[in-house]
Image: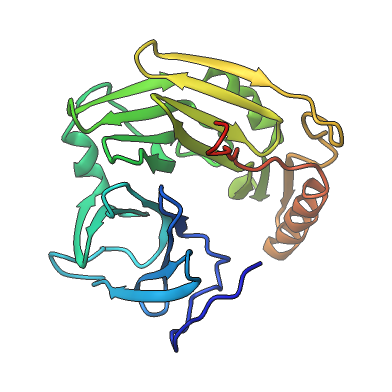
């Protein structure tokens, strides 16, 4: 815990810094402020607020979507922002937002149809982009990794066969015979050298993805305090003809699942690698 001098600025902490990132050199933090709709910055060396850059929602230079679920700070002081409708690059106070569908069509290579892209991130130098391909149905798990190379203007899809079995860990809420809601696991993507590391909250493992070889290698580790994966002590399907009853069962199942161990994103020691 640290104390920051806000200098009169009101920070947006409602989302627990969900759309925030620390710069690659570790000197500042950037956070998307939903209420003021813009980027706020904190100097981590002097622990003080430095500036706020207001962003537009609509118009040719607007973000196009009010919900920002991803933020990545890059080496060149730019910021990469993800929304449900757009992918955006912020350079200073200038913003370039691209419609998702048109954005992916710009690159040659593997194509995908109905999947949507989630958990996306970008390399520190801004040259590589990756995201998980998720099928449109609720009862699903990632079926591939989309890798976009901005330098060669190509896109590649790398299958994730190991993740098919993760469907059994999902909780699906049905109202009658129709799926209404889902609760799955968290997935984390990050670049490490020329590869991508993928981790899942339900298992003490890391998948190393190599774009050039189109390979996925799994490494599992042993915790001294927790089991390597959580047990299924909850129903993966809850249903009722009555909406409130189905929702009650869904929340109970989620609460039971939350009792299991959950592994977070891997963090690297910059001194030792």
Coordinates of residue 103 in the picture (x, y in percent): 21, 42
Please identify the quarter of the rendering in which residue 195 is found: top left
Coordinates of residue 196 in the picture (x, y in percent): 45, 28
Q: Residue at 27% of width from left, 54% of height from top?
A: 78
Q: Residue at 37% of width from left, 19% of height from top?
A: 211
Q: Is 65 or 213 nearer to us in this picture? A: 213
Q: Is 105 or 267 nearer to us in this picture? A: 267
Residue 182's place in the image compared with 8, above or below, is above
Q: Residue at 36% of width from left, 68% of height from top?
A: 66
Please identify the quadrant where the C terminus is shown. top right
Residue 57's place in the image compared with 153, above or below, is below
Q: Is 194 or 14 nearer to us in this picture? A: 194
Coordinates of residue 254 in the picture (x, y in percent): 75, 52
Please identify the quarter of the rendering in which residue 131 is found: top left
In this picture, residue 58 sits left or right of residue 213: left
Residue 224's place in the image compared with 177, above or below, is above
Please identify the quadrant where the N terminus is shown. bottom right
In this picture, residue 1 sits left or right of residue 131: right
Coordinates of residue 91 in the picture (x, y in percent): 21, 58
Residue at the extreme top: 213
Residue at the extreme bottom: 8
Residue at the extreme left: 60
Q: Residue at 21% of width from left, 51% of height from top?
A: 98
In this picture, residue 170 sits left or right of residue 123: right
């Amino acid at each position: 815990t640290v104390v920051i001098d806000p200098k009169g600025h009101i920070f947006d902490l409602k989302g627990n810094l969900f759309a925030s990132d620390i710069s690659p050199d570790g000197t500042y933090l950037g956070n998307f402020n939903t209420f003021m709709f813009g980027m706020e910055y904190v100097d981590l060396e002097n622990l003080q607020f430095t500036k706020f850059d207001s962003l537009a929602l609509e118009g040719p230079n607007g973000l196009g979507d009010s919900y920002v679920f991803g933020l990545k700070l890059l080496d060149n002081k730019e910021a990469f922002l993800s929304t449900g409708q757009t992918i955006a690059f912020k350079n200073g106070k200038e913003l370039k937002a691209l419609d998702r569908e048109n954005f992916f069509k710009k690159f040659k290579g593997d194509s995908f149809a109905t999947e949507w892209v989630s958990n996306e991130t970008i390399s520190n130098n801004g040259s590589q982009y990756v995201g998980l391909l998720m099928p449109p149905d609720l009862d699903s798990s990632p079926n591939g990794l989309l890798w976009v190379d901005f330098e060669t203007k190509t896109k590649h899809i790398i299958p994730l066969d190991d993740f098919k079995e993760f469907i059994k860990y999902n909780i699906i809420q049905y109202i009658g015979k129709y799926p209404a809601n889902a609760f799955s696991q968290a997935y984390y993507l990050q670049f490490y050298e020329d590869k991508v590391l993928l981790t899942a909250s339900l298992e003490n493992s890391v998948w190393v993805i190599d774009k050039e070889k189109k390979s996925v290698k799994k490494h599992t580790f042993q915790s001294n305090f927790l089991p390597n994966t959580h047990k299924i002590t909850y129903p993966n399907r809850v249903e009722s003809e009555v909406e409130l009853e189905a929702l009650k069962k869904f929340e109970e199942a989620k609460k039971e699942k939350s009792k299991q161990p959950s592994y977070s994103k891997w963090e690297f020691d910059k001194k030792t690698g």
